Amino acid sequence: MGIDALDGRIIVLLAREPRIGVLEMSRRLGVARGTVQARLDRLQSNGVIRGFGPQVDPAALGYPVTAFATLQIRQGQGADVRAHLATVPEVLELHTTTGSGDMLCRLVARSNADLQRVIDRVVGFDGIVRAATAIVMENPVPLRIIPLVEQAAEDPALRE
Amino acid sequence: MGIDALDGRIIVLLAREPRIGVLEMSRRLGVARGTVQARLDRLQSNGVIRGFGPQVDPAALGYPVTAFATLQIRQGQGADVRAHLATVPEVLELHTTTGSGDMLCRLVARSNADLQRVIDRVVGFDGIVRAATAIVMENPVPLRIIPLVEQAAEDPALRE
DNA sequence: CGTATCGCTGAACATGTTGTCCAGTGGATA
DNA sequence: TATCCACTGGACAACATGTTCAGCGATACG
């Protein structure tokens, strides 16, 4: 488990310019095409690269409001609550966290008013005891992976 | 701002099988290749599709621990704290939220012990008053967009 | 009512990339 | 020394891409 310097350069290059192909990558990295292809195959079967799905902006879809909700769950209701939240399209992400029966979920909504509807739908379920919501105002660091990849590629302790 | 049914089908298809090309998409959707190409171009210039970067799994890079930290910021120190956090590779994401001087950030670490090092580095900065950390145990709903896209494509109120 | 605009179709073309082979080379390992 | 492995550099057919074109139906506008 881990990546080397070439893997790191491949991932970073791919993250910065996703549309370039294997051939162009091999030219820029100064290695043979087959090498890049083999590395990419390995990174994908390793699970390091999960896929190349489109990154969709919820705001551009008409959901400009993002919020994080901390949910307190009644003992033993975890599975039911998970299933319930999975049915709500506005729940983009759900984590169970430390703290007895706590979950953290990322929500989007069409407006602050619409957020109320979403939260009502989220918490309108028996197993949820309490919910605390924080509305996102700014996103100074959007979800990123490049710095971590660069660190993982440099750090000998992580080599496979 | 918004998408129609064809846009929705394009995005969902792309999310499920990212490797297929424009030609294959046009075959499956039963429309002309030029139509798919034009839609994709529009979705990208609209900002609905931000890109096709690789989805990297931090766990496979050697960072299996994820945590969310709520930070309380001293008044007026927001910009400095943002700049500080941006330099920490283990900070994958940062949001400012409602609540005076509050931020929420997503962290990863190599182990629970390593998380202590990361948190020390994160909060070892003057502007941060207090930090509360929740370690992620499970991720029942990984970051997803398909249900929202399907809803946005069906909802006439969101049509552009 | 006629006309312009728009998006979609179906086709064509040259160009580039992909998937897949192969033999050869060098380093590391047993 | 012999074996394994990754990388190189090349080849080939098959395919997808970018681009352009004329035609067509629906919608909006004078």
Image: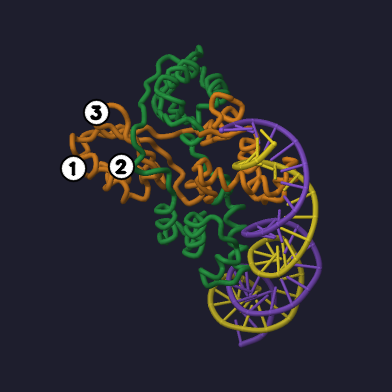
Chain colours: A orange, B green, C purple, D yellow
Q: Residue at x 36, y 50 (%)?
A: A89
Which is nearer the N-term, disc 3 or disc 2?
3
Which is nearer the N-term, disc 1 or disc 2?
2
Q: Residue at x 43, y 53 (%)?
A: B146
Residue A119 is marked as 2
Residue A15 visible to an observer of this rendering: no
Spatial CA distance of label 3 from label 1 is 17 Å
Percent x, y for residue D18? 71, 60
Residue A126 is marked as 1
What chain does mark 2 sit on?
A
Q: Relative to residue B28, is residue B93 depicted above or below? A: above
Residue A53 appears left or right of C22: left
Q: Secondary structure at mark 1?
A: loop
Indicate the amino acid at tag 3.
Answer: Ser
Percent x, y for residue B128? 46, 16
Q: Residues within 10 Å of mark 1 (few under 14, many from 20)?
A: few
Q: Relative to residue B75, is residue A7 depicted above or below? A: below
Q: Secondary structure at mark 3?
A: loop
Q: Residue at x 58, y 52 (%)?
A: B46
What chain does mark 3 sit on?
A
**Residue behind mark 3:** A100
Q: Secondary structure at mark 2?
A: helix
